[in-house]
Image: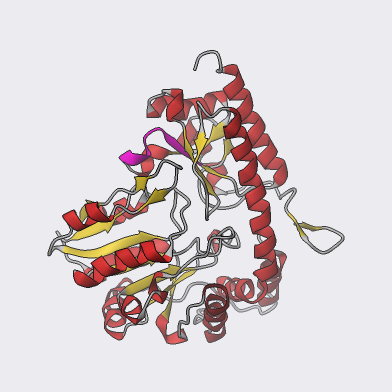
Amino acid sequence: MKYKKNSIYDFSTSTSRENTNAEKYALREKLFGTNDVLPVWVADMDIDTPDFVLEAVKKRLEHPVMGYEEMPKSAFEAQCEWMKKMHGIEFEVNDMFYSHSVVASMSVAIEAFSEVGDKIIVQTPVYPPFFHSVLDHGRELLKNPLRQREDGRYTFDIEDLKSKIDAKTKLLLLCSPHNPVGRVWRREELEEILELCLAHNIVVFSDEIHSDLVYAPNVHIPFASLSDKARDITITAIGVGKTFNMAGFAISSVAVPNYELRERFLKVYNRVHFAQGNVLSHAAFEAAYKDGKVWLEELKVHLFKNFFLLKELSDKYPHLIKITPIEGTYLAWLDCRGMGFRDKELREFFIYEAGLGLSAGISFGREGSGFMRLNFAVSSAKMLQIVEKLEKALQEKRGIF
């Protein structure tokens, strides 16, 4: 990463990840049938991990012993302070647990708060592990599809949810901010969900891994912050992986403030034996929360500029692509239904005509049919490549559509 003369972070270029084990590059042949695509699917950034994180890792390497290590209390203290200042919620260190991923934390919650055959609410289209985690544990999916408004934004379908909840409904998996539709839920929307969950004794697992990636004037509202009652039914999954491009450190955390829920969660957590992660991830995690505020603010300005380039492109071809308004995340939800393609044909258009490897919308549930998800967390230089490739493909096919 380079710096401009006025000390503002520079995201114009980034280090190449070609010929590394980076998942989005290494799996191109397997997923897209060719290596000749620019990958914009998996949700990590093609942006250098911040220098202050890497410096903390280098400093830890000065000590030559890499044995077992407990998650430092100071690391959780740094995270709790971040959550208080950035999101207005106070967690105690004793509420916090290490996890190597949000999906792992979700699996623990499913086992801890439901039995085989119980129903678990997922709100589609949604990140695919929400489906897989439920089904892999022998639970029943209770699908509560989001409702798309005329302006393209999505909202909860509360009436649909009311009609489906029954005595076997034990857990709701909330994606907040939402992946892939980019919503940052308003307080009044979350309060409607809370009211239903309280009335039916439903525990909420709130995946808030994208909570730092919210664009003004939108504000992330942690579900547990809605009220004391909300705090008592919520398991909150948070971390540095998305915010600071640190997924490779395999470290996140989960907050469980309520004592009874914490004991039930711990019973499964300890049985799985999560341990405490690795020594380098601890140092990286703490440094990110202590030193990352300015970097994050500059990153969000850069990301929104990238999104705006996509928006400009879609505005040129509104009969072919509509871009869903974004409030959070770095994942663009492209409505490509105007092209008239089936899902397989749509995917092949992006691969073979545009040379881009996106996530197929259908993988997020049948409500994603006709959509594609594009990760715009890339350097300015790479974003220009993405836009140019897509526009060229659209121009060449203009007479066919």
- Is 154 magenta? The answer is no
Q: Is residue 375 above or below residue 347?
A: below
Report x, y in % for residue 285: 57, 72
Q: Is residue 286 above or below residue 18?
A: below
Comparing 267 with 109, the one in front is 109
Q: Residue at x 61, y 20 (%)?
A: 395
The tally of labels here is: 0
Q: Quadrant of residue 337?
A: top left
Colour scheme of the picture: secondary structure
Q: Is residue 18 above or below residue 279?
A: above
Q: Which residues are magenta?
A: 366-373
**Side of 116 where 327 appears, left or right:** right
Report x, y in % for residue 248: 55, 59
- Is 371 magenta? The answer is yes
Q: Residue at x 59, y 33 (%)?
A: 315
Looking at the image, the residue that sits furthest to the left is 167
Report x, y in % for residue 58: 70, 71
Is residue 342 at all visible to an observer of this figure?
yes
Comparing 286 with 277, the one in front is 286
Report x, y in % for residue 24: 54, 45
Q: Quadrant of residue 51?
A: bottom right
Q: Quadrant of the N terminus?
A: bottom right
Q: Is residue 172 above or below residue 349?
A: below
Comparing 87 with 296, the one in front is 87
**Side of 84 where 361 appears, left or right:** left
Is residue 104 at all visible to an observer of this figure?
no
Q: Quadrant of residue 67?
A: bottom right
Q: Residue at x 43, y 36 (%)?
A: 371
Looking at the image, the residue that sits furthest to the top is 399
**Side of 123 where 296 appears, left or right:** right
